[in-house]
Image (cartoon, rainbow, N blue to C red):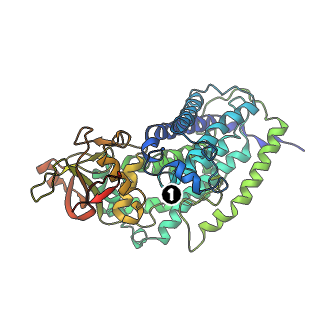
Amino acid sequence: MSWDWFTDPDYWASRLAFQRVLAALYLIAFLVAVNQFRALIGTNGLLPVPRFVRRVPFRRAPSVFQFHYSDRFFAAVAWTGAVISAALVLGLCDSVPVWASILVWAAPWVLYQSIVNVGQIWYSFGWESLLLETGFLAIFLGPADTAPPVPVLWLLLWVLFRVEFGAGMIKMRGAPCWRDLTCLYYHHETQPMPGPLSWYFHHLPKPLHRLEALASHATQLVVPFALFAPQPAAGIAALLILVTQAWLVASGNFSWLNLLTMTLALSALDSHLLPFSAPTLAEPPLWDRVLILVVTALLLVLSYRPARNLFSGKQLMNYSFDRLHLVNTYGAFGTVTQIRHEVVIEATDEPELGPDTVWREYEFKGKPGDPRRRPRQIAPYHLRLDWMMWFASLSSSYADAWLEPLAEKLLAADPETLKLLRHDPFEGRPPTFLRARLFRYRFTTPAERRATGEWWVRTPRGPALRAGRLGPDGAAVAAE
């Protein structure tokens, strides 16, 4: 049996670029975990891991933390993943044997899998599954001095196809504004976390918004099929995806979703588009070829349900059909909200409440707050609490499990929770009362912006959490 078909040296440079960027995204993901886990899922966090693993068995949430959890152990796991990822970014593992490359790339996948599977609502987003699915395939790409294996390259294209086509199909099945090309009249203003250019994107002429929507449909519903065509068609399709994803990076903050999609697109570029000379490459050993074929067969079998989901009238978004996130469904913004609301948390240190009580606002790092504060560029870093606050503004059901515990942490001036915020108006001192209010936010018009210097106009809509204080047992109780 000839193995000539199994590798393709024309993808040496794209494989190397893919691995470098993927390792950098792994590094960011682990640093996010290091910086935020204590407040969110730590022993004394809003949704503690120890409480989660007591009620959810290993088979439903595979994780090293099922066997042992402490905040120190979690930090060690996250820092280990960060160090390994940094080594991969620097190319320190480029020339190791194939078996060592497999082990090194498997390490961040196992460690991040462990974090995601106990992360609960804070780790419930599509980019977590996408990082794990892509990271699993990276295990089998081989070191830099071996020829890239074609089956793994094809599997990467299959992931990219599902990301793009799934997003396109969910839009066509979703809000009517996607079909009449008007969704982007609102999206830049109402997206979860606008960026520094979102105000300008929002004020583009409406014909350009319609062109944006049309380009999105073309890139997500037509272009992905060309990924499986011979070169240069596949490379051109990948370049189109890179351009549209770069547009999304510029217009908002979507964690590492867009950069990871661009990373997948890199794998479709051959030596004609990345003209770097490849060194003399060794062929993978026989055992590695057999292993890759077994993994390919497994993933193709597991792909049945995600593939069926793409054409289902009840299409699921961002869903994993297996506990290891090996093959998943993707998609976003099947519906687009036309009005933006924000939950604003305020507190006071006055001993009693009255009509003249002065309330002071907590400022978050990324989500809209102070109307004069320009939206920040956060991605590819991910502010998990800020992101979930957007969901809380859509429906209280998204925040039932954590908004009241958050209020209790702020009333107690919990240091780890305060680290998640940009500004604590009480400088580490516990307030006496706290409340949350719902506001309607909209971008200022260009005239309003010139006159006031503000980026947002906000109008109060009502309470999101009644005013309360900390009771003797440490739980928040309503103010009398």
- The image quarter in which residue 269 lies: top right
Where residue 458 appears, as percent x and y from the top left, is: 20, 58
Q: Is residue 207 left or right of residue 31?
A: left
In which quadrant of the rendered image does the N terminus lie?
top right
The residue at the far front in this view is: 472
Where residue 248 appears, as percent x and y from the top left, is: 42, 51
| Residue nearest the observer in this picture, 30 or 156 | 30
Mark 1, other Cα within 10 Å: few <14 / some 14–19 / many ≥20:
many
Amino acid bearing label 1 = Thr
339 in relation to 66, above or below: below
| Residue nearest the observer in this picture, 175 or 391 | 391
Helix, strand or loop status at disc 1: helix
Q: For the image shown, how many numbered marks are present on the structure?
A: 1
The residue at the far right in this view is: 1
Where residue 394 appears, as percent x and y from the top left, is: 36, 64
Q: Can residue 204 be seen in the rendering of this structure? A: no
Q: Is residue 428 left or right of residue 45?
A: left
Q: Can residue 384 be seen in the rendering of this structure? A: yes
- The image quarter in which residue 438 lies: bottom left
Residue of label 1: 219
In which quadrant of the rendered image does the C terminus lie?
bottom left
Where residue 29 appears, as percent x and y from the top left, is: 50, 41
The residue at the far left in this view is: 356
